[in-house]
Image (cartoon, rainbow, N blue to C red):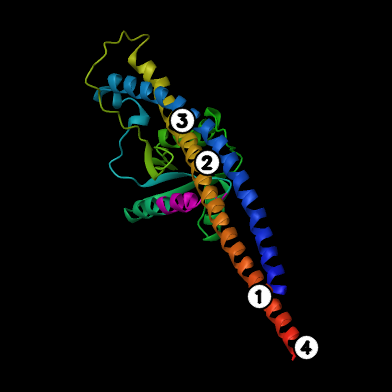
């Protein structure tokens, strides 16, 4: 019964694989909940920053702050791509890389020189494989990104933009809308585009002055945009990995059922053949 033993070995192998994918699914589910909490915690602060900036903004103030400078033509741009360090998450990283390549292609098509900055082993590995130069890379940001990580990523780019060496800074990340909706998006973080004013205008008492407040607010606004990209990408990654591992677990279960039915049919066929041989042998002895 060589075929039967082979099928039993395959069943055992798929069962072991199912145990692994089920474990990864449970881990991703746990991490996804914590990552979602960080996303939800970051959004109110981002909204508050945007509201204050919208109310403080005026064209005369914009002329005095480098981060609000709107260049007539983008000659040099930086693209910050946020991927993951790990795989097993379906098309998560490939969608991000596709979005980044489209953005870089568009900017270069408009005549800009593009510096590519990559977060995550998957993005770094891909662009090294295709021979694309990477201006900087980070693979040490774990599954709990911090505001310090965001500052480390963007402060150097912000300084280059302030000095006029960069005309635009973009971040490519996965936006976490829901467990089922995590699109890869591109967002321009520099120059700062003043948010639209809300219907209800607040009357502020400014102290010490609007200039000094904006001097602190604008860098915080830029850092927060990158921090949100990090936490939303992490939540989206855990969601994608959970979905991928659940699908793998379900597929393994289906495969096990098919293999078991095949094994049972093979075993029944062998038993039937053995019975037929016994009956034939007995009939031959009697005849």
| Dot label at residue 18 | none
Q: Earlier in the sequence, mark 3 or mark 4?
A: 3
Q: Give the x, y percent position of residue 113.
A: 40, 51
Q: Which mark is residue 272?
A: 1
| Mark 3 and mark 1 residues within 8 Å of each other at the beta carbon | no
- Where is mark 4, residue-wise? 285
Q: Which residue is mark 2?
A: 238
Say which label, 4 or 2, has the lower sequence index.
2
Is there a contact, CB below 8 Å, between mark 3 and mark 2?
Answer: no
Of the two numbered discs 3 and 1 in the rendering, the one whose residue sits closer to the viewer: 1
User: Of tags 3 and 2, which is closer to the observer?
Assistant: 2
Nearer to us in this view, 93 or 79: 93
As drawn, 206 above or below 38:
above
Residue closest to the eye, 26 or 259: 259
- Near mark 4 (Cα within 10 A), the count class, few <14, some 14-19 or many ≥20, is few
| Res. 192 visible in picture | yes
Looking at the image, tell me whether mark 3 or mark 1 is earlier in sequence order: 3
Magenta span of residues? 87-99
Answer with mark 1 or mark 4, whichever residue precedes in sequence.
1
In the picture of the structure, the residue carrying the numbered disc 3 is: 39
Question: How far apart are the two marked residues, 3 and 2, measured between alpha carbons?
Answer: 13 Å
| Pointer 1 or 2: first along the chain | 2
Disc 4 on helix, strand or loop?
A: helix
Say which quarter of the image contains residue 252. Answer: bottom right
Q: Secondary structure at mark 1?
A: helix
Between the C-alphas of marks 3 and 1, the distance is 62 Å
Q: CA distance from mark 3 to mark 4?
A: 81 Å
Q: Residue furthest bottom?
A: 287
């Amino acid at each position: 019964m060589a075929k039967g033993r082979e099928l039993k070995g395959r069943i055992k192998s798929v069962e072991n694989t199912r145990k692994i994918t089920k474990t990864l699914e449970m881990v991703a589910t746990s991490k996804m909940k914590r990552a979602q909490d960080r996303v939800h915690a970051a959004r109110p602060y981002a909204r508050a920053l945007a509201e204050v900036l919208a109310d403080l903004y005026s064209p005369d103030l914009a002329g005095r702050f480098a981060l609000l400078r709107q260049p007539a033509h983008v000659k040099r741009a930086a693209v910050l791509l946020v991927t993951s360090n790990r795989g097993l998450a379906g098309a998560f990283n490939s969608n991000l890389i596709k979005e980044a390549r489209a953005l870089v292609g568009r900017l270069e098509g408009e005549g800009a020189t593009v510096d590519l900055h990559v977060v995550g082993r998957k993005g770094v590995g891909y662009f090294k494989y295709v021979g694309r130069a990477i201006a900087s890379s980070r693979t040490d940001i774990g599954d709990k990104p911090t505001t310090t990580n965001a500052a480390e990523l963007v402060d150097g780019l912000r300084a280059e933009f302030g000095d006029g060496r960069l005309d635009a800074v973009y971040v490519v990340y996965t936006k976490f809308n829901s467990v089922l909706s995590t699109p890869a998006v591109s967002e321009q973080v520099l120059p700062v585009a003043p948010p639209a004013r809300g219907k209800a205008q607040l009357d502020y008492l400014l102290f010490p002055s609007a200039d000094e407040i904006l001097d602190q607010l604008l860098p915080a606004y830029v850092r927060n945009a990158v921090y949100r990209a990090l936490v939303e990408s992490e939540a989206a990654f855990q969601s994608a990995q959970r979905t991928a591992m659940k699908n793998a677990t379900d597929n393994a279960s289906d495969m096990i059922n098919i293999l078991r039915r095949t094994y049972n049919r093979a075993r029944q066929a062998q038993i039937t053949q053995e019975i037929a041989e016994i009956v034939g042998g007995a009939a031959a002895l009697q005849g």
